[in-house]
Image (cartoon, helix red, strand yellow):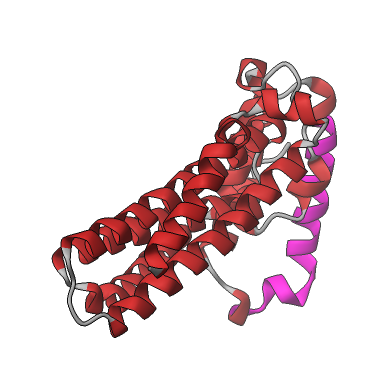
Amino acid sequence: MVLVAVDLVVGLFVGLQLAYLFGGSDTLDAGGMKYIDYARRGYFELVAAAALAGGILVGLEYQVVRRTRAYVALAVALVGLTIVVLASAALRLQLYQDAYGWTELRLYVAVSIAAMAVTLGSLAVFLATDRTRWLGHVMAVIGLVSLVGLNVLAPAAFVAERNIARIIDPSLVPPDGEASLDADYLEVLPDDAIPALVAALPALPASESHRLRGQLRIRADRMAREDAFTSPFAWNLGRERAKAALATLP
């Protein structure tokens, strides 16, 4: 009864909102919405839907006595409907990133969406095979892999490289997007971003290159003088690579 009711509510929501969920720029134009509002609504709706669906399914798994085919089918259907909302959130985030570029926060949100997708997929498999007791273990592994993957990826370098590519190749930016270099944001990125910024200087437009070069020189001066950067206890590989890159500035 619980699953039938929840499936009907979520299914009705997805059915009525299908154009809104996947409307993209058409939805923005029709509703007069901003990119940021469209993306944020998608993400927080996703978190609420995933938490509700997952909580209900895990709770039922601990209570159900006989796992009939109808029960399993309804449970898997609820996961599938939640994945539809997940896909919508991913689409909205991509729309926002295409228009304005990457930030570390947007990267973390994208990784969280990917982690939820894997979690939901695992939940569907476990429901179908009566192995939901392993869900907690899988979620722990997914969380650990996500954290390790982010560290290997180096979010600051990833963000800097993608945003610089948008300046060098304006075709990567949609007609209603912004292709300007947010040097103020790039300035506060962690040290991992500096090698990418230095390497991109010759390819940037003269005005952008001049501004970014000045900020990098200030960063180099700080690294040379402040104890927070010169102390042996402050050593890390990303900082050493940043110092080596800054040393090549003319």
Magenta part of the chain: 209-232
**Residue 166's quadrant in the figure?**
top right
Q: Is residue 147 left or right of residue 101?
A: left
Look at the image and tell me whether residue 4 can be seen. Answer: yes
Q: Main secondary structure of the magenta part?
A: helix
Residue 171 lies, in percent from the top left, at: 62, 15
Residue 220 magenta-highlighted: yes
Quadrant into which the C terminus falls: top right
State the residue in front, 1 or 142: 1
Above or below — where is 1 with respect to 36?
below
Q: Residue furthest front?
A: 1
**Residue 224's quadrant in the figure?**
bottom right
Residue 218 magenta-highlighted: yes
Above or below — where is 131 with respect to 32?
below
Q: Is residue 36 left or right of residue 110?
A: right
Quadrant into which the N terminus falls: bottom left
State the residue in front, 88 or 142: 88
**Residue 72's quadrant in the figure?**
bottom left
Q: Is residue 155 left or right of residue 152?
A: right
Residue 46 lies, in percent from the top left, at: 56, 55
Q: Which residue is at a point 64% across and 57% down the rendered structure image?
A: 44
Q: Which residue is at a point 57% across and 48% down the rendered structure image?
A: 157
State the residue in front, 104 or 164: 104
Q: Which residue is at a point 61% across and 53% down the rendered structure image?
A: 43
